[in-house]
Amino acid sequence: MFKKILIANRGEIACRVAATARRLGIQTVAVYSDADAQAKHVAACDEAVHIGGSAPKDSYLRWERILQAAQQTGAQAIHPGYGFLSENEDFANACQAAGLVFIGPPASAIRAMGLKAESKQLMEKAGVPLVPGYHGADQDPALLQREADRMGYPVLIKASAGGGGKGMRLVEHSQDFAAALASCQREAINSFGNDAVLVEKYVLRPRHIEIQVFGDTQGNCVYLFERDCSVQRRHQKVLEEAPAPGMTAALRQKMGNAAVAAAKAVNYVGAGTVEFIVEQPGGYDQPDAMQFYFMEMNTRLQVEHPVTEAITGEDLVEWQLRVAAGQALPKQQSELKIIGHAIEARICAENPDNGFLPATGTLQVYRKPACSSFSISDVRVDDGVREGDAISPFYDSMIAKLIVRGDTREQALARLDTALAHTQIVGLATNVQFLRHVVKSNAFAQAKLDTALIEREKAALFDQTALPLPLAAAVAVAHQLQAEQALQGHDPFSRRDGWQPHATVQRGFEWLHGSATVSAVLTYGRHGALQLQVTEGGNTTRGDLQWRAATDNACGGLQVMFADERTSAHVHVAGDARHIFTPRGAVMLELQDPLAHAGEGHSEGGRLTAPMPGKVVSFAVQAGDTVTKGQPLAVMEAMKMEHTIAAPADGVVQELLYAPGDQVTEGAELIRIEATAAA
Ligand code: ADP
Ligand code: ADP
Ligand code: MG
């Protein structure tokens, strides 16, 4: 076994690999960029080497520098994690040339599976079922259009070199094909440096079911069952679970064997995932009618590998290290068993209610489910950040992965909901509340899974507030009283909270929830009794307010009772914001200072600013152009996604303030527009 390895990655996966290495007594070397000088993965390793600037191309993708770091620290092998260099055959070759072991498959297997089109040709020969489509070398647009017309719409155009949900276009009608092809090729050349595409039949209501495979240098290859990753947004995974609901032993074996055949066709060694798209013509509960087709093989450890670890009890990173060191697979097929059910949720810095726009910022508060009043067994948090760390625009938006295990799916779901309820993040937008809505949706609970679940259930998933606002307001008031009491101490003569023995005193509060106003009047009665009246959206709720500090758990917090409802709660203050977390849900109320309105004006039509930090991809206009409200003006890219910036009003473009390729901060002025005077 190796004595020392270098981990050529960052974030949660670098921490994950380091944890297993430590357990096995293997020393670890981290590499880090400028932005990651203080990162958790650096602290998680025994040594660390600075490899350059914050942008991936200046650090985590600089493989000569990484090889040099390995040699200077005496590392024997390099673990690439996922993303970055993990599927780069040149890097795998360079490791070998430098006398280092690449902890991954042979370069030839990476190459064979690297391009979706070529890998499909190989799989066809190996007898693995494929989605009907065209994956030939001839890229003549007229030919591609004819192929699409022949297979019938809808079709999916995919960048052959694509990944991470990027470089795909759904085309529903023949007349839209040419434009979609051009836009797909543009994105493909920009993101992957290769504009080759394939066209395939768009499977309706499909499931994404993938098989974890493992090979060793002795020619053994096994499958560690499936993961269902059907819950997606923008073709990217949101929730992953194992086993796949409704899977039968027969189908599992068929898919497992097909995945092993795929791996063997490229002499696969190490951890890999064969992704299948599964058609369910008989509906959700007819597994016998399910048809599976090869989509692609990911020649690396997958983000969602922990669910497989949870149901098999195996440590896949340990398997990777053993196989890379030349050992045989720790287990044979017949020794592998599924025990229970596991689900992973990807917690991301993003705003689900605003098109999943990525968010950046500082994790002012970052509390994990471990710190909860009741212990939740079988909960695992994989992350690469700590409270106080920044989520920067340089890397992807995943903050943490929450993985839970249960004896049954129902139990795993309930635990996931509890774990999400105990995840408190302040400082940037996250999808935590959104994930809770997904987990609790009927479709997900009943395992009616397909890749359109989020779109189909959107009415119940977006813009939802699970915590009633009157109760949230009561929590905010209780928190305010607690803070004042802590300031004043318990001396009744110095109390400023309005309490007086023989008088009734009232106090008003006002907050904003989104753009809606929530107001409250607190009335101090005799003997410390409190009455609260909350008004929001024209509704008024009245009742007694009682509160006390929660002393029965390690994490503090409040117990609040208002109008016959009782809840435990945590409140985090950030400026005027009151971030309220309860088991039922979380909301943010912004305390209104009446004076704050004084200087408020209207944002002028002349400023068009970046809605998030990111890179300017292209401009659709130039100086002098007349534009109309809603017209696309520019494309920005942030954290694996493209966003179109539209004109806020009619006007004339005065100046473009950045060039394509420029990195801009949130709020930076992109384009100066002179608004056309309103008639
Ligand atoms: P999974 O492991 O679940 O298949 P993805 O395919 O979304 O996950 O990719 C895993 C990680 O690899 C992502 O978080 C991303 O950082 C990185 N990644 C994958 N493909 C690409 C790509 N083509 N360009 C940039 N990053 C990628
Ligand atoms: P990536 O390399 O970006 O992961 P994949 O080929 O694995 O690309 O596809 C990503 C997702 O796109 C799948 O999980 C699935 O939701 C959807 N998808 C891919 N191919 C098809 C298809 N032929 N029909 C319907 N959906 C598809
Ligand atoms: Mg994929």
Image: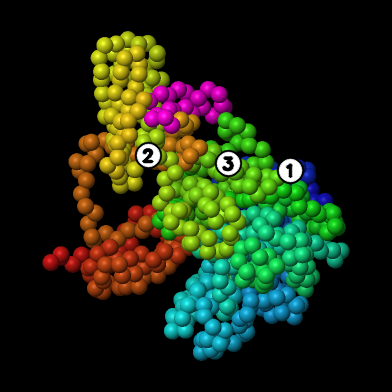
Question: In this orientation, which residue lies closer to the viewer: 41 or 488?
Answer: 488
Mark 1 vs mark 2: give the one in front. Answer: 2
Residue 180 location (% of width, % of height): 46, 78
Indicate the amino acid at tag 2.
Leu
Circle 3 packing at 10 Å, graded few (<14), some (14-19), many (20+), is many
- Image colouring: rainbow
Element marked by disc 1: helix
At label 3, the amino acid type is Ala
Q: Quadrant of residue 628?
A: bottom left
Q: Which residue is mark 1?
A: 22
Which quadrant of the view contains residue 373?
top right
Residue 469 badge: 2
Query: Is residue 592 left or right of 484 when viewed as pictured?
Result: left
Mark 1 or 2, nearer chain start? 1
Q: Which residues are magenta?
A: 545-565
Q: Residues within 10 Å of mark 2 (few under 14, many from 20)?
A: many
> Could you tell me which residue is drawn at 33 percent across and 66 percent down?
646
Residue 554 inside the magenta-drawn segment: yes
Cα separation between marks 1 and 3: 27 Å
Q: Secondary structure at mark 3?
A: helix
Per the model, the C-alpha gap separating discs 1 and 2 is 47 Å
Which residue is at a point 52% across and 64% down the rendered structure image? Answer: 452
